[in-house]
Structures are given as C-alpha cells and as structure tokens.
Image (tube, rainbow, N blue to C red):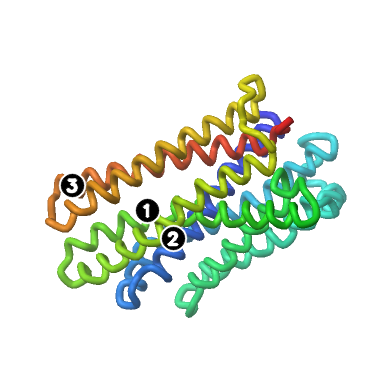
Amino acid sequence: MSLASLFVLCRFVHFISVMQLFGACVFTRLLSPQGLSALLARKNQTLILTSACLSALTALLMVAVQAGVMGNGWTDMLNVNVWLLVLTTTFGEVWRWHMLMALVALLLILIDGLPGRFLMAMLLSAGMLIGQALIGHAAMHEGTLGVLQRTNHAVHLLSAAYWFGSLIPLLTCMRLTHQPATRPEAIVALLRFSTLGHAAVALVVLTGIANSAFILQRWPTDIHSPYELLLVCKAALVAVMVAVAIYNRYWLVPQFAHHNEHTQRRMIAVCWLEFALALLVIALVSLFATLSPN
C-alpha cells in the first residue's frame, strides 16, 4: 500500500469515527428524554468508545502519513523532526488542535461516571468536524467568499454527521419501544430525531450543492475528470439516501405505531441500508478530497 492510499484509508476511518461519535452523543444526550438518556448511553457505550479510540488513533496516524509524504517515505513516518515540520504547515496548524480534541474526547469517554462526559465529547467532535472546514478544498478561497465557503462546509459536515451518526443509536431506541417502561420516552426520542432529521437532510443537500459551486464554480459535467466523476457518484448516492429516508419517514413510520413486527424489520433493514450507503459516500469523499478539482 502506498502512503497516498494509506492517507485515504485513514481519512475514511477518521471521518466515520468522528461523525459516529458526534451523532451518537447527540442522540443519547440531546434527543433522548432524561430518563432514557442514561440507558441509551450505556447501550451505546461500546460504539461511542470505539469511535473515540479510532478518531484519536487515525488523527495521529494522518500526521505520521503526512510526515512520510513530506519526508523520504515510510522511514520518516516516525521522524519527530518531520512531524514538527508537518505541524507548521496550514494542515498542521489546524491538525494540532484536531489531535488535541480527539485525545481529550477519548480521555473523557474513558473516565466512567464523569458527569457530562458525552456532552463534552459531542462538543469536541463538533469542533473536529468544524476544523475540517479550515483545510483542503474547503479553504481554497479567501476573504468573504472564503468565510462563506468554510461556514457552508462546516454546516454540511455537522448535518451529515447527525444523519449518519444517529442511525445505530436509532436502532437501539427502536428496540426500546417494545418495552412498556421505556416505550413512551423512546417514541419521544424517535420523534425528535425525525423532526431534526428533516432539517439535517435538507442542509446536507443544499450545502453539498453549495460546496460544489464554491469549488468548481460550475456544474460537474466533465466525466473525464476523476474528481468530478466521483463527485457525481457521491451526489447520486446521497439522492438514493434521501429517497430511502423519505420512504422510511412517510411510509414505514406511520405503520410502526401499530406495533407491526414486519414494519419494524423493514425499518431496521432501511436504517442499515442508509448506513451502508453513507459508508460509500464517505469513502468517495475520502478519495476525491485528495484529488485536484481542476
């Protein structure tokens, strides 16, 4: 595997873990009523801990890979002097804070019983997502246009992270609707997720279109450009995800209220389908984010 390929893989795992950490913390701490919040946090603790571990590990590994790229290859991945050079670049100036937030989030999750640890981890993961808008293609413009582009990209990432990262906690919450003691609060959490989900999906689509406009300043019609071809593929996958989400919300959810087991199985399958499609989208983004849009 080349260093370039390893960097794409690290980006893929890092994006997944940070978005999963953010979405899971949002669902368990902000969307869930107080009586259900602690239960959902316990049931999703392994997911949250794994996400925090991977986000911290890949944040460090991405700097190591960048050191190898700037230096003499694999041998310089652990060269402290090259690491220090990487941290003086535009990427490094942002990433030093990114690594700090990832490590602090992991430490917070590891301290069992710490009040507000999931809320603080949510804020730190939000900071990591916002920081992504300060590097790469999202930072190609300066001045007012640059501020608009970075803000738009930050909103795009936060909305996408809410959508993607909430899917697995959503499945946990759906199972709790079958228990009389937790059913009322579980339904409240599901309704809150659905309400905010409308806004998140709309923002993902609108900010995604705006991102393309900021970067390309035209429609992605050049099929000979690898960047534009992958961008179109991403847009097509997102369109499928939107269609699946609409089917889930306006066809299956009304039937779910009648305790229909067949409907619940279909909703679970639809959620996993959305999760799989999201992984493909993130994989494409991890790849074409390293390509030149020109």
Name the residue type under label 2.
Ala
View extreme (top): residue: 224
Along the viewing direction, whichever of 110 and 90 lies nearer the viewer? 90
- Disc 3, SS: helix
User: Between disc 2 and disc 1, whose residue precedes?
Assistant: 2
Nearest-to-viewer mark from 3 and 2: 3
Q: CA distance from mark 3 to mark 2?
A: 24 Å
In the picture, measured across the screen, residue 29 lies left or right of residue 65, that is left
Q: Position of residue 267 (x, y in %)?
A: 25, 47
Q: What kind of residue is marked 1?
A: Ile
The image quarter in which residue 228 lies: top right
- Location of the N terminus (image quadrant): top right
Which residue matches tag 3? Answer: 263
Q: Residue at x 30, y 62 (%)?
A: 190
- Residue 145 shows in this picture: yes
In the rendered image of this protein, does residue 218 appear above or below residue 62? above
The residue lying at 58 percent from left, 66 percent from top is 105
Instruction: Return the residue at label 1.
Output: 168
Residue where numbered disc 2 is placed: 24
Which residue occupies 59% across, 66% down? 124
Disc 2 to disc 1: CB gap under 8 Å: yes
Residue 291 x/y as whole percent: 70, 33
Q: Nearer the viewer, residue 105 or 293?
A: 293
The tag earlier along the polypeptide, 3 or 2, is 2
Q: Nearer the viewer, residue 252 or 212?
A: 212
Left or right of 89? Residue 163 is left
State left or right for residue 216 relative to residue 171: right
Mark 1 Cα-neighbour bin, 10 Å: few <14, some 14–19, many ≥20: many
- Image disc number at residue 107: none
Cα distance between the residues tagged 2 and 1: 8 Å
